[in-house]
Image (cartoon, coloured by chain):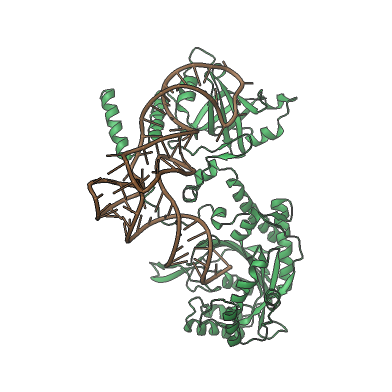
Amino acid sequence: MTNLHLIAYFCHKIKFMQLSDQEIVRRESLNAIREMGIDPYPHEEFKVNTYSGEIVENFKDDQPDAFQEVRLAGRIMSKRGKGKAMFAELQDSQGRIQIYLRRDDICPGEDKSLYNELIKRHIHLGDFIGISGFVFRTGVGEITVHVKSFTLLSKTLRTLPVVKTDSEGKVHHAFTDPELRFRMRYVDLTVNEGIRDIFITRSRTITAMRSFFDQRGWLEVETPILQTIHGGAAAKPFKTHHHTLDMPLYLRIANELHLKRLIVGGFDGVYEIGKMFRNEGMDRTHNPEFTSLEIYVAYKDYHWMMKMTENLLEEITRKVLGTTEVELADQTIDFKGPYPRISIYESIEKYTGIDISKMTEVQLRELCHKLHIGVEDNMGRGKLIDEIFGEKVEKNLIQPTFIIDYPIEMTPLAKKHRSEEGLVERFELFVNGKEIANAYTELNDPIDQKERLELQLELAKRGDEEAMAMDEDFIQALEYGMPPTSGLGIGIDRLVMILTGKKSIQEVLFFPQMRAKSSKE
RNA sequence: GAUCUCGUAGCUCAGCUGGUAGAGCAUCUGACUUUUAAUCAGAGGGUCCCGGGUUCGAGCCCCGGCGAGAUCACCA
């Protein structure tokens, strides 16, 4: 074929593939690079000996010798050509550093094609390169790597958004479309500053949590995600089907009942950090799959668990943020314990002036109408109290606050209060107006447990879709005997939202749930 | 699930009572060996989310759909 034929064929092909002009340019460069005898996707290891952040942090003008032979790898994020020399920015896992490429240093001989052709023409923003050279400071004060040798490590075929930051730190042309950011998180992570840090904070939070528990001798465990009975919480499950067994299975909405079975089996403390799945609405605090921590410790009660929770959060914030104080947009939250403990009745009285502790279901329903709180007929006493709490109290709980001693109706897995009739030993921890933890003195009386779950079946009959299911095997486990135990659950995503100051759960999930791609893609 | 707002070049966005689409960055060509939102001169690039309708004519108006965000409902 002649060149013309090749071009015609190529044009036809790219039209068919609907490539943008910039994608065509990159594919042409890819071919040109191969024709130069350079592999655009080389196999061999490229050894680095430092990172951008280390150089920027440690370079001293009076001791340039320490950085005479640096080797770095990363993406080209900007190019400022100046004819026979060029400034560019290299981005690696630690950040960005300016590099300086001078034609006659990179091509000392007669053949200048490596600079003129490869670097000037065929290296594009986003390409992965490896460099070696020495560090210096330019006339305008920028710490820069003067490149002596240059290796293409991987060619990119698509154009990254170009985000620029000016001398005042103002960001221009940020990649902001949330749909594109979340569908193409790899691009978001590459071009938007600070996204990596959210996930580093997330990872460190989980690490801190794990080491806190491990130090105390509690065992990290894994329990089934595919369950035959979706127990342990009030929520709609995802349903699936196992072909070989020909039976329905549910993705777990909670792992509580399995973890308690392990306490029955003799472990003193077990915990699991993992995904839960709830087939419910999505908004900026709910994703269909989310991560929870659940921990159960034998021979403890919820008073002990409150202290443990304070210690845990204090340690996490110290390790992850270096302080117990978290700066949010409009306030500072201090995780240093102890946190106030207020009963749910007291909290409602505090914010409404009304004592509801002795009210009947009928009286509570009337009160809800008076307070303009929407209620439904199938709501029981506990649910009504929860509605009032959610409407009038929750948003006021900014600093970490334990709300304790909930009405029995809504909490079928918690032990009855040791002294207060009609209540259970439960606490929830509220921070910045949101619940982030939930804990009980666990119900270990099998007969009481069975009655409480039967009550849930009654609620289900009344039309409560989310009433808890009966789990006979769990009851049987309790009949074999469970030691007094306290359990705690923490919503990891929401905790990370607070620690990173993010208002949307999508921001703290690498890949938040999205609908199937739009035709835009 | 409901309501509101949005969807235009690779990215961020303009687009007039409805008259066959623009800017900045990016890309391409050229100049420039310490620049930095590099600069200067020129050029190319579009399924205006999809499908109907109204109209001589639709990016714009109407209907339906898809996707996203916000608010509400449900929930953690």
The location of residue A485, given as percent across then percent down, is: 68, 74
In the picture provided, is A327 more to the left or to the right than A86?
right
- Image quadrant containing the N terminus of chain A: top left
Work out which residue is located at the far top of the displayed protein and give it.
A110
Eyeballing the image, is A396 above or below B54?
below
Residue at figure coordinates x 63%, y 54% from the top left:
A501
Chain green in the figure, letter: A
Count of residue discs: 0
Chain drawn in brown? B
Asked whether A308 or B62 is in front, the reply is B62
- Measuring 59% from the left and 56% from the top, which residue is drawn there? A503
Quarter of image, res A334: bottom right
Placement of B50 over or under A370, stated as above or below: above
**Left or right: where does residue A219 sit relative to residue A105?**
right
Q: Is residue A300 something that shows in the picture?
A: no
On the image, the x and y values in percent for residue A2 come to: 26, 23
Q: Residue at x 77, y 65 (%)?
A: A338
Query: Which quadrant would residue A356 be assigned to in this image?
Result: bottom right
Residue A364 image offset from top left, x and y in percent: 60, 83
Residue A259, given in percent of the width and then of the height, sits at 60, 70
Q: Is residue B56 above or below residue B43?
A: below
